[in-house]
Image (cartoon, rainbow, N blue to C red):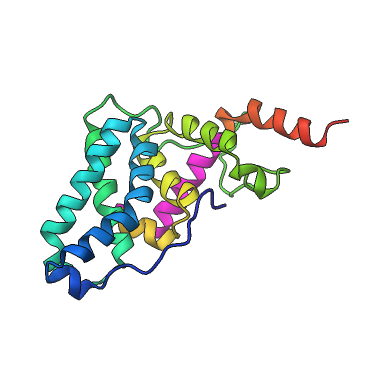
Amino acid sequence: MVMHQNKQENPPSIELLKSGDREAFARLVHLYSPMLYRLAYRMLGDAHEAEDVLQETFMNAFRHIVSFEGRSSLKTWLYRIATNQALMRLRKRKPPLVPVEEEWTMADGTTMTKELQDWCCLPEEEFMTREVQTQLERASAQLSTALNAVFTLRDLHGLSTRETAEILSISEPAVKTRLLRARLKLRELLSDYFSERVEERFGD
């Protein structure tokens, strides 16, 4: 389920960036600033810190572009820098609310092992509204740092499992496990809200 995905123009060439071309760097900043700011804001919940992360991301990118080997896409590389900057700030805060390794146990004592259909009953356009996006962002802020990062990258920014694994330096199975746990926790946090949405849409 992709919550937000914008069509993007082609980025400047790596050769131009490595040569120190100012117009190429300006284009890079213009192209990726909105999505990287949203990423940082969704992870940190603070506009000033998100701005700082954005600046730190491009400063690091400018500093290390000469060593960029192209093993991942330029977008993935920038996402990794921004995510790491945001995670460093989050680690300085209080401990996460939900441990990454916590098992999700149902009321009857059984452990949830399969992924449920995402937010059943509501069509995808429901999730594109500003109201629902806001509710999801508020709820995701209550997730642990690790779960929030995976949910933000996968479901809010629409990155693939492989891209998310590269950015967070974890395995693809770990991404899938954390995403499942994040979605289950969010389902719990947002159950009342989405029940009302379903009732409004399909109720008599």
Residue positioned 13% across, 60% down in the render: 64
Tell me where residue 7 appears, x and y as whole percent.
Answer: 47, 61
Residue positioned 18% across, 57% down in the render: 61
Tell me where residue 185 appears, x and y as whole percent.
Answer: 52, 34
Residue positioned 59% across, 49% down in the render: 115
Residue 171 in sight here: no
Image position of 94 (left or right of 38): left
Marker count (numbered): 0
Give the image quarter of residue 76: bottom left
Q: Quadrant of the C terminus?
A: top right
| 112 inside magenta stretch | no
Single out the residue that lies furthest toward the bottom: 15
Q: Is residue 16 above or below residue 35?
A: below
| Stretch of the chain drawn in magenta | 168-186
Image position of 193 (left or right of 158): right
Image position of 109 (left or right of 151): right
Residue positioned 38% across, 56% down in the render: 164
| 182 inside magenta stretch | yes
Tell me where residue 193 appears, x and y as whole percent.
Answer: 64, 27
Give the image quarter of residue 70: bottom left
Residue 13 in sight here: yes
